[in-house]
Amino acid sequence: MDAMRCAYHTDYFLPLPSGHPFPMAKYPLLYANLLRDGVIAPEDLIRPVEANVDSLRLVHTGEYLELLATNALDAAAVRKLGVPWSPALWRRSRLAAQGTLEAARAALEDGLAGNLAGGTHHAFPSHGEGFCVLNDVAMAIRVLQREGRIHRALVIDLDVHQGNGTAAIFEGDPGVFTFSMHGERNYPTRKMRSTLDVGLADGVGDDEYVERLAGNLAGILASFPADLVFYLAGVDVVQGDRYGRLALTEMGLRRRERHVLESCRRVGLPVVITIAGGYAPTPERTAELHAIVFEEAHALFR
């Protein structure tokens, strides 16, 4: 394919109060970078609508969704979420969730697709936390299972923070393998149980990281017959990230992305990419790092 299909909406960007630590500007910057470099093309863009409540109810409780829809979260819940509630936040969260679902459908057809958002893995059935409102990957898996499009899904979560919400949602579910490789001493303090958790010490660099990833991923791909892979390609593993505490270089990140994508392609698994977290010194640098997985995917699958 000349350009991969990716989901994007201008309303992925949500204005936040001045000084807020979440780099919302990374979304339009990432889109502009990929468009400029020919990694994506306007005609291949997937423009999501808002995820419907029936789909969200496959993962989240009706009570939580009602609180979100009506601005009824209490102050403690909003603090835990980490972003102020607004009608635009509710809309943006549903757009991003639907973006992951639509990208997953495209990946099943093309072998590869992406969402230029998503990977909000700290969202639990009854609450959000860590800048994550809705669990887009969990919703997409449940919808595709309900439709009969997939039976078994593999979640490869390489954000530096453990995917605690996703782990909790799918704990004990034989149809979903959750693999999280993350900073052991990083957020969240209380980690949930993924199918496989690999905790890394602070300061781990390129070679050790890629070696640990390769050994674990090979075993998973050999033993778990998935229909679709959801790849949470967080870039907060790179040295200098505000919340990262690991020490990968840009080249190490590129090696990681190439290894994941090549490994999945080798065994014939379709992959949907979500960007997850990244908190480099500037939104511009964060967007550059997020672009790497799409650049590697474009080179590998074209």
Image (cartoon, rainbow, N blue to C red):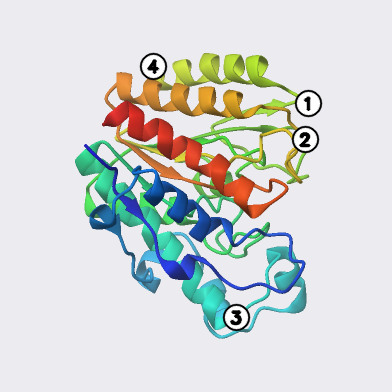
Q: Cα distance, mark 4 to mark 2?
A: 31 Å
Residue 145 visible somewhere in the drawing: no
Image location (x, y in percent) of residue 228: 33, 37
Labels 4, 1: front one: 1
Provide the secondary structure element on which disc 3 rests: loop
Q: Cα distance, mark 3 to mark 4?
A: 45 Å
Q: Residues within 10 Å of mark 2 (few under 14, many from 20)?
A: many
* Amino acid type at image mark 4: Ala
* Amino acid type at image mark 1: Gly
Left or right of 274? Residue 3 is left
**Residue at numbered disc 2:** 245
* Amino acid type at image mark 3: Ser
**Residue at numbered disc 1:** 203
Image location (x, y in percent) of residue 155: 46, 38
Left or right of 9? Residue 112 is left
**Residue at numbered disc 3:** 86
**Residue at numbered disc 4:** 222
